[in-house]
Amino acid sequence: MKKTTLGYKIKKHLVDSTALLIVGTPVYGAVETLIAGMNNTTSYHARMLGGAIIFAGAGSLYTKGMDLSRKFFGVEKK
């Protein structure tokens, strides 16, 4: 699939967003409930809102910023 097609861009967005959520959700959930003292329901709602924001487009913005940073500092992907 070519990198310019809509299907490729949607796949990349979904993969990037899912990867961000898989890493961040358990960590932030633990911080919210164990350290900050937030109750489980509030933490759950915060994680769901965060997931919605990531899938709405913030995940792609984050990964584009990461790619720009790599290019700026000359870091090569392996």
Image (spheres, rainbow, N blue to C red):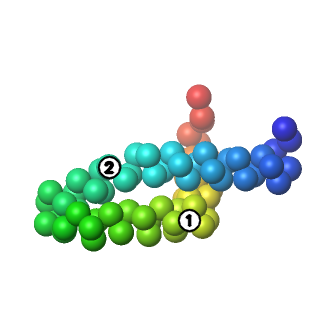
Q: Percent x, y for residue 54?
A: 53, 62
Residue beneath the point at 52% across and 68% down: 53
- Element on which disc 1 rests: helix
Q: Are marks 1 and 2 in contact (CB under 8 Å)?
A: no
Quadrant of image for the C terminus: top right
The amino acid type found where label 2 is placed reads Pro
Crowding around mark 2 (Cα neighbors within 10 Å: few <14, some 14 to 19, many 20+) is: few
Q: CA distance from mark 1 to mark 2?
A: 19 Å
Task: Give the side of residue 15 with respect to residue 27, left or right.
Answer: right
Q: Earlier in the sequence, mark 1 or mark 2?
A: 2
Dot 2 corresponds to which residue?
26
- Element on which disc 2 rests: helix
Relative vertical location of residue 73 with respect to residue 52 in this rendering, above or below:
above
Q: Percent x, y for residue 68?
A: 61, 54
Dot 1 corresponds to which residue?
58
Task: Give the side of residue 47 with respect to residue 35, left or right.
Answer: right
Quadrant of image for the N terminus: top right
Residue beneath the point at 55% across and 53% down: 17
Residue sitting at the far top: 78
Mark carried by residue 29: none
Q: Percent x, y for residue 33?
A: 19, 60
Crowding around mark 1 (Cα neighbors within 10 Å: few <14, some 14 to 19, many 20+) is: some
Residue beneath the point at 58% across and 48% down: 16
Pair 1/2: label in front: 2
The amino acid type found where label 1 is placed reads Ala
Residue sitting at the far front: 41
Relative vertical location of residue 8 with respect to residue 36 in this rendering, above or below:
above
